[in-house]
Image: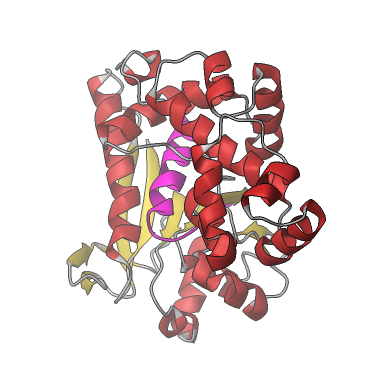
Amino acid sequence: MKSVEMFLYEDACGLDVMGPLEVLSHATLMLQRNGKPEQGYEVAFSAEKPGPVLLGSGISVIANQPLGSKTASDYFIVPGTIDPSHITNNATLMCAIKEKISNSQRNVSVCTGAFILAKAGLLDNKRCTTHWVFTDQLAEQYPTTQVLPDAIYVEDGNVFTSAGITAGIDLALALVERDYGAKLATQVAQNLVLYLRRPGNQSQFSTPMELRSKAGDRFSQLHDWILENIERPLNVESLADCMAMSPRNFARLFAQETGITPGRYIELMRIEKARELLTTTSQSINQIAGISGFQREERMRRVFIKTLGITPSQYRYHFSADANNPLSKPA
């Protein structure tokens, strides 16, 4: 049984607390149902003082022990809030947090909880992340940190940090997988009716939304045209023709406007199309390669490994919502 201490404080984000809690609770329940009552997570809530703590959403949660408790734990979890300065500027509280961190096997932050870990010195020279709105601020306030602004969650040694709000759910699932295996983590994700169990290096942004934002007003119609013609062979010449521009002028203006080359833009849109088909259809990998414009399975495989770190088959195995996936069935 893994011991978990979750730190509560006034105005902490409710989903930062409840999201990971539900994941860990579901994992424990499923282990019990599978005849393993000695495994799972035992969660305790701590605060500066025991008693009710009013979260930012207006819900009160009872802290059953003071933060200063000497009890060691496997995980110490710190949720985020809109402005964590009322915690980081509290010298007495930060002293207690530092002591608790030293007594925990692994320390975890959700969203802006990373600022609290950073203030405690835990993120010095470590890779980390937080909500994308605050990544620049975290890097500026704590220059010895190595902030990864686009990551869903980051593991560095015994420290785990996650991006905004719902990313705490992704991180909690990753902890379940680390402790009890991918099969249980996938079962928990499906029981919670999550669309996907996202890997930590996946972007905080939806790729289509991010790319459309990059395209801006000048290339928004081109974005739609690419989407409609994703199966076709596309190159700079065909895109330039669509925009009634010379290939050279188009390539220069497109890179200047979006920050990426036309080729990479198309590649990212094809990856997103392939990911959608992998998780929502039973079509073969080769068929999906054709529909998404990669033409050949091997080409799609190379691009997936380069961009996502896994093959299309591995992606489907881990993230498919297909009910026939063996991972979807309880042990």
Tell me which residue sits at (41%, 52%) in the image: 168
Look at the image and say whether residue 160 sits in the magenta stretch. yes
Res. 13 image quadrant = bottom left
Closer to the camera in the image, 168 or 51: 168
Number of numbered callouts drawn = 0
Tell me which residue sits at (35%, 20%) in the image: 322
Question: As displayed, is residue 172 above or below residue 165?
Answer: above
Res. 330 image quadrant = top left
Q: In this orientation, does residue 181 appear?
A: no
Closer to the camera in the image, 93 or 135: 135
Task: Locate the C terminus and report the quarter of the image it occupies.
Answer: top left
Look at the image and say whether residue 224 sits in the magenta stretch. no
Start-end of magenta stretch:
159-182
Closer to the camera in the image, 244 or 329: 244
Estimate the x, y position of residue 166 in percent, counting from the top left.
38, 54
Estimate the x, y position of residue 280 in percent, counting from the top left.
38, 26
Closer to the camera in the image, 209 or 315: 209
